[in-house]
Amino acid sequence: MTGRSVPEWIGKTPDTPVPPRVRLRIFEAYNGTCYLSGIKIRPGDLWDLEDIKALCNGGENRESNKAPALKDKHKEKTARDVAEKAEVYRIKSKHLGLDKPKSRPMAGTKASGWKKCMDGSVVRR
């Protein structure tokens, strides 16, 4: 077991911002390298703390789930995380029968609400 001199920071809510002292600890833990691209973050570069496992996909707002990422790489990963969440939601909804098919009934069937008479005219059922 590795001994930590300070306890791990855990946010009270998913929206709780990471304090500056914790940002510095995380930055130093990754030796100032972008977690996503492996590029060294230089002074003046814009960077964020990235959730390794996105909060929307079940991650936690805690120090062990954070890593430094350059701003543009962070945006790309966030877009992928949101797309993954949407895909999982779509599949789960379909599996549970919550997502009704949006197709129209076949023309001429009783479900369509119209019928064709012998003289060729079309009337409501």
Image (cartoon, rainbow, N blue to C red):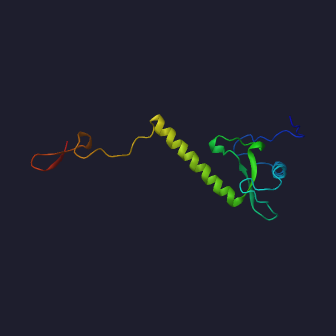
Please name the residue shown 68% across and 44% down the image: 53
Q: Quadrant of residue 13?
A: top right
How many marks do you count on the picture?
0
Please name the residue shown 82% across and 48% down the image: 22
Q: Position of residue 78 (x, y in %)?
A: 64, 52
Quarter of the figure with the N terminus: top right
Considering every residue shown, the one lying at the far right of the view is 5
Quarter of the figure with the C terminus: top left
Considering every residue shown, the one lying at the far left of the view is 119
Q: Position of residue 31 (x, y in %)?
A: 83, 53
Q: Quadrant of residue 70?
A: bottom right
Considering every residue shown, the one lying at the far bottom of the view is 44
Q: Position of residue 15 (x, y in %)?
A: 70, 46
Say if 48 sits above or below 7 in the image: below
* Along the line of sight, the residue nearer the viewer: 52 or 118: 52
Please name the residue shown 66% across and 44% down the image: 55
Q: Quadrant of residue 88?
A: top right
Say if 110 sits above or below 24 in the image: above
Image-based side of 36 in relation to 56, left or right:
right
Image-based side of 51 in relation to 98, left or right:
right
Please name the residue shown 63% across and 43% down the image: 57
* Along the line of sight, the residue nearer the viewer: 59 or 37: 37
Q: Position of residue 18 (x, y in %)?
A: 77, 48
